[in-house]
Image: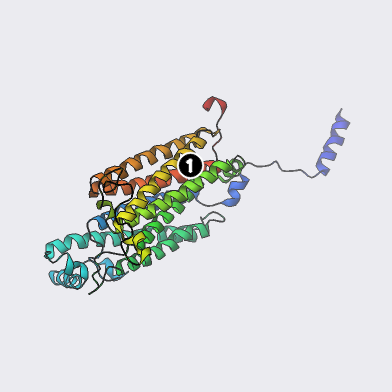
Amino acid sequence: MSSKRNIFEEVSEAQPVQQAAQPGAIDRGRGGARRAIRLWLMLLFVLVMAMIAVGGLTRLTDSGLSITEWRPVTGAIPPLSEADWQAEFEKYKQIDQWRLHNQWMDLPDFKQIYWWEWGHRQLGRVIGLVWASGFFGFLLARKIPTGWTGRLILPGALGGVQGAIGWWMVASGVTQGEGVTTVASYRLATHLGLAFVILGYIAWYAFLLAREERELMQARRAKEAKLFGLSTGLLHFAGLQILLGALVAGIDAGRSYTDWPLMGGQVIPPNPFMIEPFWKNFFENPGLVQFIHRICGYLLFAFGVVVWLRGRKSAHGHTRFAFNAVFAALSVQILLGIVTVIYAAPWQAAILHQVMAVILWVLILRARFLAAYPIATSIKDV
């Protein structure tokens, strides 16, 4: 027995020893501080959501044109003396909004609208600083996971573009002698639309970082392709409705017809194409713009029902719950839209309607993500 044992040991020593497979190799290969980056992205998400809400309140208080210059750096410092305040007020008096609508204002009234716009711009600067400090901090510490550098640059790059679009929007209302007293509605829609795009990217990246790479790779094999396609369509449809809502807000079309379900006692509002040239009616005719927003809302709800019914058939409990949440939010949003119209768009209802649009947008994204990366559940959890 001893000789056999010796022979066995000699053969064993001559053979190369294979190392056992070690779990977690995929995740270690990716590296990075996934949890910390996700927390940073969640902070950015909250700030962008607040930015959208503050932007809505800035518009509802007619404060957006109170600062008539774009000073990305020096504009961070507000007026510090009475002379500075008076100088800013004099600049505002040069534009058509003051000349045609706000000549009743004195300096204290001007200060109120100035602080709204200054706060909106300042919040944008804060978001930029939070993004830059987080991104370059993780970059210098070499904590960004493999393949994520470009993804994390994107929100910052889009944020820079958003700042330029914000001034492009404001500049359309800073006019003299043209009779323009508000920003162009299509520029407002562009500004709001890009904000939702930025918010969507941040949310999607946070969803990805919440799960390990190996888990995502396994989940991708169970992707529900049809449900993913339907939720993608719903996301795009909701995005279109958000843009139409911005057009409504840009010309205060929500206050033009306050009856529902009819408009002015009829299905199609009176004089839907009274503006020349014809195409301007789709941007500047309050009745037609509100009518299109209403019809799109009905169609969105109908499509949402189709997607919800399909989502209820998912084999995964978390996915089913996500689509139930989408349908609940969509129903609430439709009701809020009707209430906003009936009460002639008071600021409380209008801002709640806008915030609910953010919630609905993110819930659709979440449902879409779970259709692409289902969370496996055991039989006892079903």
Residue 381 percent coordinates (x, y): 52, 27
Q: Front-most of 140 and 372?
A: 372
Above or below, 202 relative to 88: above
Q: Residue at x 21, y 70 (%)?
A: 96
Q: In the figure, residue 333 lies in which quadrant? A: top left
Q: Is residue 135 left or right of residue 174?
A: right
Q: Is residue 36 visible?
A: no
Q: Residue at x 22, y 74 (%)?
A: 177
Q: Front-most of 323 and 158?
A: 323
The residue that label 1 is drawn on is 367
Above or below, 356 relative to 145: above
Q: Is residue 21 visible?
A: yes
Q: Is residue 280 left or right of residue 343?
A: right
Q: Residue at x 16, y 72 (%)?
A: 90
Q: Is residue 6 left or right of residue 130?
A: right
Q: In the figure, residue 89 lies in which quadrant? A: bottom left
Residue 7 percent coordinates (x, y): 87, 36
Residue 242 percent coordinates (x, y): 38, 52
